[in-house]
Image (spheres, coloured by chain):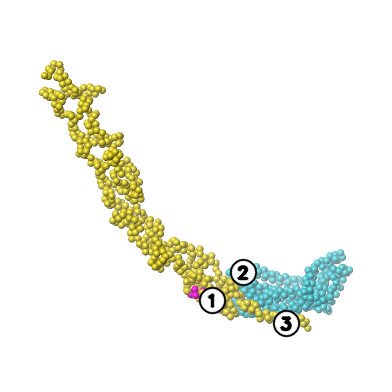
Amino acid sequence: MTAAVTPARSRPPRIASRVWAVLLLSVAIGIAVVGLVGGAEYYRLPLAERPFSALYDLLRPAGSIGLRYGIVGLACITAGVALYTARKRIRALARAGRLKYWLEFHIFLCTVGPFLITLHTSFKVGGLVSIAFWSMAIVALSGIFGRYVYVRIPKTMAGGFADLAAIRRQREELREALGADLGPQLAEVDRIVGVARPATDTGLLAAIGAAVRFDLSRHATLRRVRAALAPAKLPTAQREHALRLIARQLQLEHELAHLLPFQRLFRYWHVLHLPLALAMFLIVGVHVVVATLFGFGFTA
Amino acid sequence: MRPASLTLGRRLVRTLLAVACLLAPALADAQLISPGRLAQAHAELEGVGNCTQCHDLGRPGISNTKCLQCHTPLRERIAERKGLHGSLGNRNCASCHKDHFGPDFAMVRFDTATFDHGSVGYTLRLAHLEAGCRSCHTPALVVDASVRAYATRHRSLARTYLGLGSSCTSCHQEDNVHGRQFGTRSCASCHLEDTWEKASRFSHDSTRYALTGRHREVACADCHKSVTPAGSTEPEVQYAGVRAQTCTTCHADYHRGAMPQRCEQCHSTEGWQLLRNRTGFEATFNHQRTAFALRGAHETLSCASCHNPRRPATAAIRMSWPRAERGAMYPAPDAARCTSCHVDAHEGALAKTAGGTTDCTSCHAESGWSPSSYDVARHNRESFELTGAHVAVPCAQCHQPVRPGGPPQFRLPGRDCASCHQRDDPHADQFAGRACTDCHGTESFTIADFDHGRTRYPLDGAHRDVACSKCHTVTQGAGGVSYVRYRPLDTSCRACHGATTPRRP
């Protein structure tokens, strides 16, 4: 039995997954709002005026809150990186939940962490540790890009990347299911969504451009399909099931057409993402050692 | 097997990262572990090796001890508990003075508008409050040697707030207009910080010459003149050493040396005209020393009787005041003659010349107008000899007022008997053209022993025994006036004796 291939964005979300995502998002937004709103008065001050602000002793990098921002932020990044890396590389953790959730937690920690680090800097970056900061920023931003690429590569149920044969097989299964749902209407749907294109290794920029264009036109295409199916007056459940399959097919066709460049893009992204993260940890380590030497520990 | 491009890419990225790490110190402006560049004043402390010049390992923040190892003037002041820093106790330097905010960061910053200058041991008052901080805290006025040396060495002389003196002359030596008059006395003993021109604290009572009375109203410059001290080329107003032994040092002697006593024995500073013990002065003043010796009634008068221009004129007294006497305490009226003050009761009738002035002293003395010295002897000698009954006649009976209420007429128009006695003439003009004194004397009109022999009919014989009235009878004259007829009489015998009387041979 082949591993089921599911396009990343077509599986109906489960309640727990949605709650998990909402929870993480809420915590992240909450931290952002509290941090920014509470410190906006201080962060908006010119650098030379900050020492004379009432919030200086709280929010400066070595302040009673500012220092804790840095410590907690680094802890979040460290945990985010360590846990996700462990889940991916340690065989014993292979069955410890779907990689998807570990990734989301990694993304959560490695978004909140850099944000707290940014508050720790009070938006003033200098010295050797500025390299670590900008490395962290690039890593975090590249992570957003990396996730954009990641979700466009079909994966197995276990979360690993699917190969081309498995993707093609899944596409055939979808076509059969659609034929059963739509019958003669399938031809009309095929006319709207277009014919399947073979997987071609286009340039990276062309692939990204195609992905952006697909994202922008996806909903319009589905609306046209819905309108085309309306005359058939299919039962609602059947029509909705068919539309979900069509959406899954659309995604799968697109991913299949650009599978090779996206896989290559994702490999290149790793080349940048990981070394920068390592450089960040290296320099942050120096920064933490120096800060501790000068008495700025957690209890300072 | 990985694509060759991927392997090449990874090598490229790793190489770039390695280069970036090596260049990081340079790229980070050699800050490395520093949180930011130091302020300009601490520029020489930049560098990783100098962190411990200010920081202690293992202890967050700044070490006060390390700060004060360099900031020696402050260390001295803190040790002596002087100035602002001497009053801060154990406060950490970094609580007020931050760093690592760049070369242009002002490490010393405070709200000059609300800064309590009294906390440094010198309270700003009045004009000092209006001046800006840098009006006083200038390099030229830094007098503390250690502060000047330190600030010069660190090129902070223009920025420092330390090192000023607290005495007036430490800043205002050029404003000292008194030269060396006051020696080491503090300016603040007389001057406040409002203005130099006014010595608000100065009290003349604290000097050897307390100002009293109207002396307080005199401008300083009226007594304190500008002089050029010996050894100086600049004039200065002399305040110290001004001598005023006597009043005449400043005031002209109104009495021109005529008064033996000192001015202050009679006069006070409240005003020349406010004498000390005026009553006693007036009581003892020897008027004989003046140009007008008081005699007689003048001696009993009060000073104000004469020396009072405001005294209203009366019917008897009318004075005039020379212009030169205006303002005098005892202005002397014009007293050239009696009539300068006294109204001539005779209305000029006794003046020697017409329109001239009367010489009152010819008849009157200062002892009083009455009695006049014009007695009977003078009357007999100078005017009309009073004899007989005339002697007993009151002056006023002859010398009647010229008009009702007027003065008596002393110079009478005539001296003959008829001038006064016209009404007394009982003879009805029988003797017109003949003097009354032919028959009468001044003792009485009654003729006690008339010598009939002086008439045309001398009496002899029995005629001598006949009463006058036998022959001289009362006759009615014109207008029904009765008179004794004396003449002409018919001297024939028959006129008296009748027709039978023999005629005289």
Q: Which residue is mark 1?
A: B67
Assign the N terminus of chain A to one quadrant of the image.
Answer: bottom right
Question: Viewer-proximal residue, B85 or B205?
Answer: B205
Q: As drawn, is B181 to the left or to the right of B372? A: right
Give the CA separation, mark 2 to mark 3: 42 Å
Q: Residue at x 40, y 64 (%)?
A: B228
Tell me which label, 3 or 1, sits earlier in the chain. Answer: 3
Magenta residues (range): B146-151
x, y percentage for residue A230?
A: 85, 64
Question: Which colour denotes chain B?
Answer: yellow
**Structural distance between the alpha carbons of marks 2 and 1:** 26 Å
Which residue bears the numbered disc 3?
A: B11
Read off the chain for label 1: B
Q: Position of residue B479 (x, y in %)?
A: 26, 23
Amino acid type at mark 3: Arg
In front: label 3 or label 1: 3
Chain A colour in the picture: cyan
